[in-house]
Amino acid sequence: MIGFGRSKPWLFNMLLSLSRDIVLPVPHGSTWSQTDTDAFLQRARNAGVSKIGFLRHGKTAPTPENGVDFDRQLTDVGKEQAAAAGKSFGKDLLPFHDTLLASPAPRTMDTAQIFLDSSGGNASEVRIQPVPSLYDRTMQPEGSRLFRKLGYAPFIDYVTNESEDDRESSRKVLGSYAHFATKSILETLVTSENGSSTGNNLKGKVLWVVGHAIYLPATALSVALLAGCDESSTDKILSTSTKEAEGFLVDLYQSRVAILSRQHD
């Protein structure tokens, strides 16, 4: 049994519902069972996936004159950041799964494409699949209110906020986002199961998810718990403020989390 639920029951309870109606049976106790973890890992193994990477979009220009957040574009710096991500950690994590999941916003789609173009290897063969639920504006207006107050703070600052209203609202908003994002990941694994040529190769491939700031760690945390990562790994996600064109890597078979950082000049 994974003891994470006992040490942080509020976090377990927030994420417990994420899998209840997605793929895995969820126990009624305070921990994930080894059976739940094994079921998730078997789906990934069948799909040839050994790691799941979470990448935040690069630096973005302010909201344009039309006032539509969706239309915000990467700046030149943001494009350079996305390219640097591919040339640093991207190329070292090849091969990639043949589908990359991304928010449909231009800033995330462009980050994904530049990242793939700069990673080399089989990245040029990867199909970018826009997933509407990965767009952070789907969590509005409450998500925007929380962001105006807390900004790019680490995930833990949102869900343990001293304000009870903000704390509960954060858990609801971020939990909902993680629910839909995790569902998209699992659907991708299921779709890939029968067609994978990787089979039981433990090296496998990396399935990438490209999304937005504070919402991305919520999804990474959900996957880390399903993968059976221990508290030292999940604390990395909780305490890290995700930088532009950086993120997290969940190793499903080593059950650990790594921070993905670009090589800075």
Image: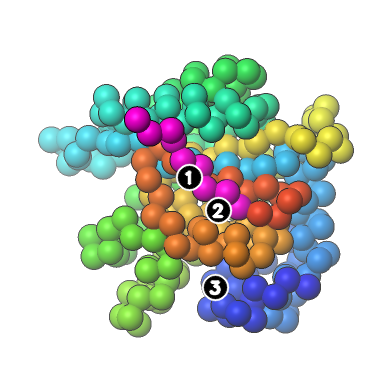
Q: Is residue 32 left or right of residue 201?
A: left
Dividing the picture into quadrants, the one containing residue 199 is top right
> Circle 2 sits in a helix, a strand or a loop, which is it?
helix
Tell me the distance, in whole angstroms, between the alpha carbons under discs 3 and 1.
20 Å
Tell me the distance, in whole angstroms, between the alpha carbons under discs 1 and 2.
9 Å
Residue 29 rendering spot, x and y as whole percentages: 72, 81
| Mark 1 touches mark 2? (CB < 8 Å) | yes
> Circle 1 sits in a helix, a strand or a loop, which is it?
strand
Q: Earlier in the sequence, mark 3 or mark 2?
A: 3
Residue 5 rendering spot, x and y as whole percentages: 64, 76
| Magenta segment boundaries in residue numbering | 257-265
Q: Which residue is mark 3?
A: 11
Is 108 placed above or below 40 here? above
Q: Which residue is mark 2?
A: 220
Q: Which residue is mark 1?
A: 247
Q: Quadrant of the C terminus?
A: top left
